Image: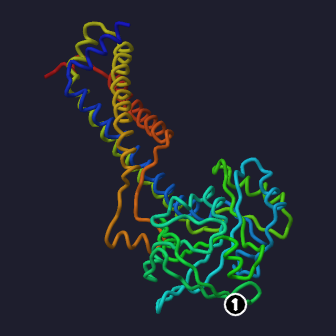
Amino acid sequence: MWLIRLAWKNIWRNRNRTFITMAAIFFAVMLSVLANSLQEGVFNNLVKNVVSFYSGYVQVHKKGYWDEQILDNSFESSAETESTILKYSNISSVTGRLESFALASSGELTKGCLVVGINPDKENVITSLKSKLTKGQYLKSNDFAVLLSEGLANRLKLNLNDTIVLLGQGYHGATAAGKYPVKGILRFGSPDLNDKTLFLPLAASQDLFQAYDIITSYILSLKDTEDLNSSAESVRLNLNDSFEVMTWEEMMPDIKQHIQTDSENIKYILGILYLLICFGIFGTILMMMEERKFELGMLVAIGMKKTRLIILLLIESVFTVFSGCVLGLLFSVPLVYYLKVNPVKLGGDAAKAYEQFGFEAIFPTSTNFFIFLEQGLIVLAIGIVISLYPVFKIIRLDPVNSMKR
């Protein structure tokens, strides 16, 4: 017990030295938490923008549809198929879509667009489509109107209640043509979706393409997104061979590869950061040992056992490192939360470069509890391991030489 009291007194005997050591640990925790939460936040935002806001985590198509995405590769929707899909407990909801391409026109302006026929209520449950509405009103199932993405509306110079003309090819080569009022404007985080997407109620889209009771895909939402592959496999086993079940990773391998590549790169960045942390902590330990060389030599000279001196220094080091970690975590929580609510946004050419690849040019952080826990424990472990250096020095300590001025 007396060693703990003595360690406490030693820590505050030289406040500047203690504060410098704790500051090194403090900033180490802050930087490592910020780097890790920024990495996870950016990837989560990318998946959210492209996956949970449009494609869903799992899709069911007619076999061969993904290789040749045409209306002829569609299938008839049925309550029986939906109930079969919902048998797996991790599937929370399912909705059908009819997707095809058409030429959108307004006056003399034209642009190709993706026409998506949806069940408005079910679609909102899965992709929160209503939350993307910036102007106007959300669709109802019996509406004969459209929701336009913001980029498409700007390109065609359309606003609420204006009329858009759609022209394309319908089911089995039929002509698809229709005029619709604009009921709402949507804004997507993904620039690719924001520039070309148009939504119709499912019945209106089936009428446009003359594909009655036909859909091109079922979109599935999951209760636990970590259980992605096993959920898809369970659905695949329950359906017959005429269907293909695909996860978002299979449908968009480029995004998965991008995340994997960046995850590997961030490991090197964190490795360099941990190396800098090691040097920072080790520098303060060296400074402490040099300042206390006379004191340690004197304690050994007057009869203090080296084992007790080692325990004393370890208690001091553990307390200093632990305090720095706790303070670093306490201050990093509001910082990470602020950057989650107010993410870093790129502008100018940098933003355009990201948008060319279909990524939103913002960098939010993640408030995942395990990031704070993991990084705090890593820095704590680094600090404690480096704090073993004084043990090595005391074992080799020569009282006479250490007390020489």
The total of numbered circles placed on residues is: 1
Residue at point 74% right, 90% down? 173
- Residue 342 shown left or right of residue 293 in the figure: right
Taking depth in this image into account, of 330 and 283 the one nearest to the observer is: 330
Above or below: residue 326 compared with residue 65: above
Quadrant of the frame with the N terminus: top left
Q: Is 40 in front, or is 194? A: 194
Q: Residue at 27% x, 37% y: name it.
A: 283
Q: What residue type is labelled 1?
A: Thr
Q: Residue sitting at 84 percent across and 60 percent down?
A: 80
Describe the element under mark 1 as helix, strand or loop. Answer: strand
Q: Where is residue 388 in the image (x, y as percent from the top left)?
A: 39, 28
Place residue 17 in its image quadrant.
Answer: top left
Q: In this view, does 269 lie to the left or right of 300?
A: right
Q: Mark 1 — residue?
A: 175
| Residue 343 percent coordinates (x, y) | 38, 54
Q: Which residue lies furthest to the left in this view?
A: 405
State which quarter of the image contains the C terminus. Answer: top left
The residue depicted at 60 percent of the width and 59 percent of the height is: 124
Q: Locate residue 257 relative to residue 297 in the image: left or right.
A: right
